[in-house]
Image (cartoon, helix red, strand yellow):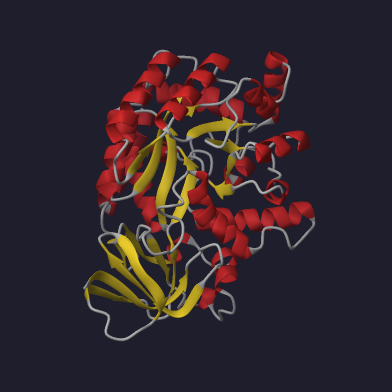
Amino acid sequence: MFDLVIKNAWVLTMDENFTEYKNGYIAIKDGKIAEVGENKENLESREMIDANGNIVLPGFINTHTHAAMTLLRGYGSDNPLKVWLEQYIWPVEGKFVSYEFVKDGTDIACYEMLRNGITCFVDMYFYENAVADAVKSAHMRAVLTTGILDFPTPGAKTPDEGIQKTIDFIKEYKNDEFIYPAIGPHAPYTCSPSTLQKSMQVAVDYDVVYHIHVSETLHEVEDIKNRYGDTPVKHLNNIGVLNNRVLAVHMVHPTDEEVELLAEKNVKIAHCTESNLKLASGIAPVPKMLEKGIIVSFGTDGTASNDDLDIIGELSTAAKLHKGYNLNPTVLPAKQVLAMATRDAAKAIRLDKKIGSIEVDKYADLVIIDINQPHLQPLFDPYIQIVYSSRGSDVDTVLINGKVVVKNKEVLTVEKERVLSIAKKWKEKILS
């Protein structure tokens, strides 16, 4: 007797062989996938979902965001990154960021991500205990990091205090089923070598991900060269913090030599296509990194610089952008791009034994895409159709740990009217 069975599904497992079942089923027991294959008779289950031929694939993984920044969506837009941060974002955060701000903003983010089929996300912000509370309430999965900087933040007055709070957070959630604590030194230009090295020691001691912005803008590259005599990736390597625990966010401006170094050290990348475009940071050399065997995944970044939390939109933009930029229609093919948003994203956050593909004994984090719509028909290739024709609003059903959290395009674990009232409340506060 299974807990739940999805039948009559076009299952894209996103495993290493891209196994698919055009008339398949997925059986779930105790939150995990117990069986997957072509439909068979006499499946006994407490609950049954008839997919009616719709596509089922692993939940999308957003490998970089600042979830609570939904409350700053669009604020200070159309400015360079340095101006945007220093004149708009940081002053408002300094005044308003609190447990309440972060919890409310993350509630909105969880609603939006679930509605778009994102079942797991990686966060860097402040008051991550508030983020954890929102994530648990929404029944999601998340890798959570407090931003550590060398100057006072809403979360800590000193980097050492930030590191200690991270250690406390790791100890509190180390064995949690849904929260995966990690450490998040903000960037090489906001953290001293000492802060970066202390943070890496924590990552090693507690076996967690090292989440950091790297080489996002040309200004950052020049700043690091002037300060330390080397480019950002080489600087991190020089001080001994470049290894396979690193999830390097953005990576827009690595040199060819640095790309080789990233591959050698097995560094993982979170590519934030739309944020980089909006902030005019540049275009990351993703095809070059993929050629070298580097794991590249997709992050939305925060909604203040994107301005949404839709991974389908992100991967669609990326696939087309890199084809056009490289004058090569064969780069970032749809099947590879979809793997980057699922299986490879799980590898990037060291959770590929648990999520990222539809395989027996992995958590049942699943998305059903409604393909019975004019803009998705006729359907010749499901990978191509998802990447180039679908959008987040086509997500019909979402399961996390075998529990249905979105049904008939309605989020069940976060109340829509509440998040709308939250957004209105904070808009009035910020404007006043």
x and y percent of residue 65 in the render?
A: 47, 40
* Residue 144 higher or lower than 228, as above or below: below
Quadrant for residue 173, please give it. top left
Judging depth in this view, the residue of 295 and 149 nearest the camera is 295
Give left or right: position of 272 versus 357: right
Q: Quadrant of the N terminus?
A: bottom left
Q: Residue at x 55, y 67 (%)?
A: 18
* Residue 356 higher or lower than 369, as above or below: above
* Residue 377 higher or lower than 34, as above or below: below
Give left or right: position of 122 versus 6: right
Q: Residue at x 57, y 26 (%)?
A: 241
x and y percent of residue 256 in the render?
A: 77, 38
Judging depth in this view, the residue of 153 and 88 nearest the camera is 153
Residue 242 visible in the displayed image: yes
Quadrant for residue 383, please give it. bottom right
Q: Residue at x 36, y 60 (%)?
A: 361
Q: How many marks?
A: 0
Give left or right: position of 64 versus 424: right
Q: Quadrant of the C terminus?
A: top left
> What residue occupies the far bottom of the structure in this picture?
41
Residue 156 visible in the displayed image: no
Judging depth in this view, the residue of 74 and 192 nearest the camera is 192
Q: Residue at x 28, y 51 (%)?
A: 139
* Residue 339 higher or lower than 232, as above or below: below
x and y percent of residue 305 in the render?
A: 53, 39
x and y percent of residue 150 in the render?
A: 50, 15
